[in-house]
Amino acid sequence: MSVREITFAEALNEALRQEMERDENVIVMGEDVGVYGGVFGVTKGLLEKFGFDRVIDTPISEAGFIGTAVGAAAMGLRPVVELMFVDFFGVAMDQIYNQAGKMRYMFGGKIKLPLTIRTTIGGGLSAAAQHSQVLYSIFAHVPGLKVVVPSTPYDAKGLLISSIRDDNPVMFFEHKLLYATKGPVPEEPYTIPLGKADVKREGSDVTLIGLALTVHHALKAADILAKEGISAEVVDPRTIVPFDKETILKSARKTGRVVIVDEDYDRCGFASWAAAIIADEAFEYLDAPIKRVTTPNVPIPFSPPLENHILPNADKVVNTVKSIFKRK
C-alpha cells in the first residue's frame, strides 16, 4: 500500500469518497454537508463528485433527517448521517435509540440497519456547554448501537469504512481537536475490525487507557513519565461497543496498575465501566487501586481557563500515576 501523511479530516473524507465509489447505495446526509462541505470540511468535494442525489443538504431538523436515514437504511441504502455536534442528539434520540437501535431485533432480523451517524465531540475550543461534550457513554448504554471513537487518522479511515459496511447502526464519534492532526494513512481502502483495541505504546509499570483525544494525553504523559523511570503502556480501545476487554485485561495483568483517561463526565461514564471490568476480572493482578482522570459533572464552561481546568490533560495523568506509585 502507498502511505502518506494526511489529516484526520482528510482521512475521513477519503473513506467516504472511496465507499461511495465502491457502493452506490452509500449516501451522505446532514446540515451543510453538500454545498458547504461540512462545518469541519469532512464532506468537502463529495457533492461535486456524486451529485445532489447522494450528498443531501438537509433542513435544520435532526429528528427529520435522522428519521429519514433510519427508514432509508431499512429499505436498503447505507446512509452516513452527519450530526453536527453530539450535543444535539436529544432532538433525535427517539429515532436513534428507540428506532435504529431496536428495529433489527424487533423485526426478528428480517431487516438490516446499515446506518452510520457521524458526530463531533469534545471541548478545548471554548464552544461552551451546548457544543463541547463527548457523551458517548450514553449511546454505549443503549442495546443495538455500536460505538466507535477513533484517535488517529489511520484509525479514523479504517474504522469509518468498517462502520459504513456494517449492517447495524453505528455511532461514530470524531473529536474536534483531532481534525487537523496528521498521520500515515494508506491511499487504498482498508478496514479495521470493530471491537479490536490497539496498544499505542508498550510499557511495563502502568496501563493508561484513553479514547479519542485522551489517547494523545496518555501518550504525552507516558513520555513525561519515562523520564522519571516509569514505563507506561497506552491502550486505545478504539470502539466501546463492541469492546475488546481481553486486550485491556492483558495489559492490566501485565503492569498491575491502571489509569483510565476519559473526557466524558465522571458519573456513570466509560471510565467507571472499564474500571469495573478490570476490578471484576483482573483484581488479583493489581498492585494499586484503579484511578480515573475524567471530566467532573458540570456544564463545560465557555471560559478558556475554566474549561482547561476541568478537562483531562497530560499533567493530570502524570500526577495521578505518581500518586499510585507513592502508595505503600
Image (cartoon, helix red, strand yellow):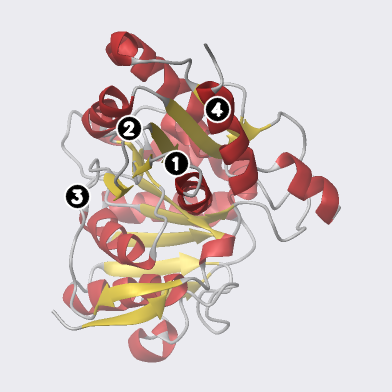
In-front residue for pair 58/217: 217
In this picture, residue 317 sits left or right of residue 232: right
Whole-number angstrom distance, CA of label 4 to CA of label 3: 27 Å
Q: Which residue is mark 2?
A: 144
* Picture quadrant where residue 192 is located: bottom left
Q: Residue at x 59, y 47 (%)?
A: 314
Name the residue type under label 4: Arg
Name the residue type under label 1: Gly
| Element at label 3 | loop
Q: Residue at x 46, y 76 (%)?
A: 43
Where does the N terminus fall, quadrant-wise? Answer: bottom left
Q: Which residue is mark 3?
A: 193
In-front residue for pair 302/142: 302
Between marks 4 and 3 in the image, the one whose residue lies nearer the viewer: 4
Whole-number angstrom distance, CA of label 1 to CA of label 3: 35 Å
| Element at label 1 | loop
256, above or below 182, in the image: above
In the image, residue 36 lies at what x, y percent? 58, 82
Q: Which residue is mark 1?
A: 229
Q: Say whether residue 129 is visible.
A: no
